[in-house]
Amino acid sequence: MAKVTIIGSGMMGSALVFPAFDNGHEVRLVGSPLDDEIIDVSIRTGRHPKFDVVFPDGVKYYHVTDMEEAVKGADLIIGGVSSFGVDWFGADVLPKIPDGVPVLSVTKGLMDTEDGRLLTYPELWTRRLEAQGLRKTICAVGGPCISFELTAREHTEVAFCGTDLDVLRKVRSIMETPYYHISITTDVTGIETAVALKNGYALGISLSIGLNKKKYGDDRAKYNAQAGLFYQAVREMGLILKYQGAGELENLAMGAGDLYVTVFGGRTRRVGILLGEGYDIDEARDILNGVTLESLVVAQRVAKAIRKAAEYGRVSLKDFPLLLHMDRIIREKASPELPWDEFRYVK
Amino acid sequence: MAKVTIIGSGMMGSALVFPAFDNGHEVRLVGSPLDDEIIDVSIRTGRHPKFDVVFPDGVKYYHVTDMEEAVKGADLIIGGVSSFGVDWFGADVLPKIPDGVPVLSVTKGLMDTEDGRLLTYPELWTRRLEAQGLRKTICAVGGPCISFELTAREHTEVAFCGTDLDVLRKVRSIMETPYYHISITTDVTGIETAVALKNGYALGISLSIGLNKKKYGDDRAKYNAQAGLFYQAVREMGLILKYQGAGELENLAMGAGDLYVTVFGGRTRRVGILLGEGYDIDEARDILNGVTLESLVVAQRVAKAIRKAAEYGRVSLKDFPLLLHMDRIIREKASPELPWDEFRYVK
């Protein structure tokens, strides 16, 4: 039996309670500074307020003030913050993790750099820690996973990435169950880029659902347009993976699977539909009041990096019409009508 | 104004009436030897019996016996047969097309060869014609397209492939409309392989829908499993494209888009769900009595070619667990339970 401590009680981090608990481990769930209410309710009722499903009896809940106690003796720390908690996790959590204890992060996102590169969060954290003379083993998880399906123990296929295969094997052995299927890879850039990109591109695909909703007055599905955008999204994702110097096939395939699941549920789809219907970005934010919209952040960051990379002559902007279209909608409130002609190619 | 003759009045060929007609061309639709009833009804009522939508006034309908007249003066011939009409189209239609008139085929499929290769239909026909001393310019169309959405003039993104870019430009100029968006490429093997593969792999993804239907007694969607299979399908498709020596990114992206659209509708999904629910292949065929199941044929042919290629040491069978799983279900009535462990990788 191992001790698994999950820090950040958002959807995805919390859902990992299930495979960890089902493997017989001691599981501790620690709220972030924003999660006090979640932890209060969980302690009081044994139910995590973001889920319908009852959490397993025996999971221990901790407020952020008790993080030190929750980390003590842990064999694995899972970072369960959203991309809006990246700075807190890097500054206030990682330095307190004992050396040699592996960290597995579920946070999806990328940070653009001055020179037009896209940095993964494990890289970002590693650099910040190194600046303080600290070294931690930060792994990350990617792959198509709706958190409430994981809590229902549905088959889920993911990849854990990190710099050390032996550490990844150990982390996998703690987390793998008959329903949670784990590949392992040292291609951190590839996995993390792919899973971040899908958030941005799912927004682009959802636009067409909103455009049709406006045109027909209902939600009837038009799959040709969605699939055409899916096809364009995968092309652009492949080019960005290549630009990142990442392996392409496995990562692109995972990104495509992750794109598939993201188009079918959640916040990214909702904001994409609103934008497609003609609401501008401020109106869409108002309607989805209080919902965190990581997809908007990642689309803008990736677009910024690609524009910068084009200035350096490393990529050609005409290869990224869907990305730039989303960026114009977000930054300039441009019309959502899709630039179909720009998707065509001659080869 | 050009003259466009469509031969074969199945769904996809017939749907191409719309972009051709909307461009102001004279459009002639010729039934195959199996389509006499479709042509009878179309002539009598002006409605194509396979579609709800009324076809444009002015389209001319021909029985197969009048094919010669229908082909006369045509600027473009569209081959609209299913994969079960490939031999007829090669033997009885293509030799009668006047030299220099481009042919655009919508038929999706691949033919496995003795030495474990997969031949596209344009290649197959070209070889057969050459054996008779004939040369024709055979192009083909690929990409995610549900035929009834095309007849509703929904945005649709496809690629025309062929050996000659000038011919492709001409064909595109005849067919492109504000809703039918056409890329052109000389990578015939890539496009044709990708669009054939998606039929086989959509079957694999649909299995999980049937497995869940059996487990829960209803159709509730489980996207983690579907997306995990999508991810595995795209990986295997990428490897098969590579084995075929085809360009990868554009083709794989198109294949992914086409896979997306195929999972959401039509015959392939229906048979996949039945197999997942536990019906064996004969029972599924009975239930779908009379429905043509191209997906079963292509999955078997691709599996046969890959097994042969593995014998020659050109591929490794362990890279194709989903393909071989489908093949076992079709050929040996194996259990549909998915081999999730085989999808994991270490890299």
Image (spheres, coloured by chain):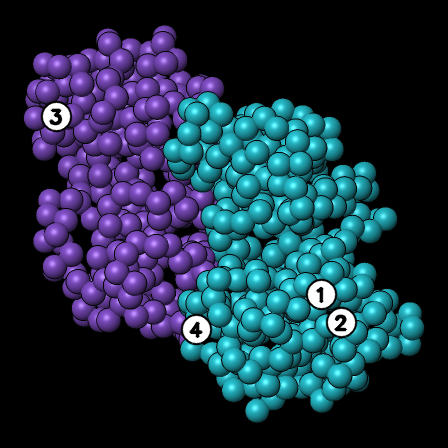
Chain colours: A purple, B cyan
Nearer to the camera, B137 or A86: B137
Q: Residue at x 26, y 29 (%)?
A: A13
**Local crowd size for mark 3, using a 10 Å CA cut-off: few (<14), some (14–19), many (≥20):** many
Which residue in the protein does label 3 denote?
A38
Residue at 61%, 28% in the rendered image: B279
* Dot 1 crowding, Cα within 10 Å, few <14, some 14–19, many 20+: some
| Residue at x-position 68% and y-position 59% | B82
Q: Tell me the tag on residue A146.
A: none
Report the front residue among A284 and B56.
Answer: B56
Tell me whether marks 2 and 1 sit on the same chain. yes
Q: Are marks 2 and 1 in contact (CB under 8 Å)?
A: yes
Q: Chain of mark 2?
A: B
Label 3, label 4: how far apart the Cα atoms are: 49 Å
**Amino acid type indicated by mark 2:** Val
| Amino acid at circle 3 | Ile
Give residue A73's quadrant in the image. Answer: top left
What residue does disc 4 label?
B179
Query: In whole angstroms, how far apart are the C-alphas of marks 3 and 2?
Result: 70 Å
In this view, the mark in front (4 or 1)? 1
Q: Secondary structure at mark 1?
A: helix
Given the current orientation, which residue lies at the most extreme bottom position?
B1
**Closer to viewer: mark 2 or mark 1:** 1
**Are both tags, 4 and 2, on one chain?**
yes
Quadrant of the frame with the N terminus of chain A: top left
Q: What is the spatial separation of the Cα atoms under label 1 and label 3, in whole angstroms?
A: 67 Å
Whichever of labels 4 and 2 marks the residue nearer the N terminus, that label is 2
Residue B64 circle label = 2
Query: In what quadrant of the picture does the C terminus of chain A appear?
Result: bottom right
Residue occupied by mark 1: B36
Using the numbered discs, state the Cα–Cα distance from disc 2 to disc 1 in whole angstroms: 8 Å
Q: Residues within 10 Å of mark 4 (few under 14, many from 20)?
A: some
Q: Where residue A272 appears, x then y in whole percent?
A: 26, 56
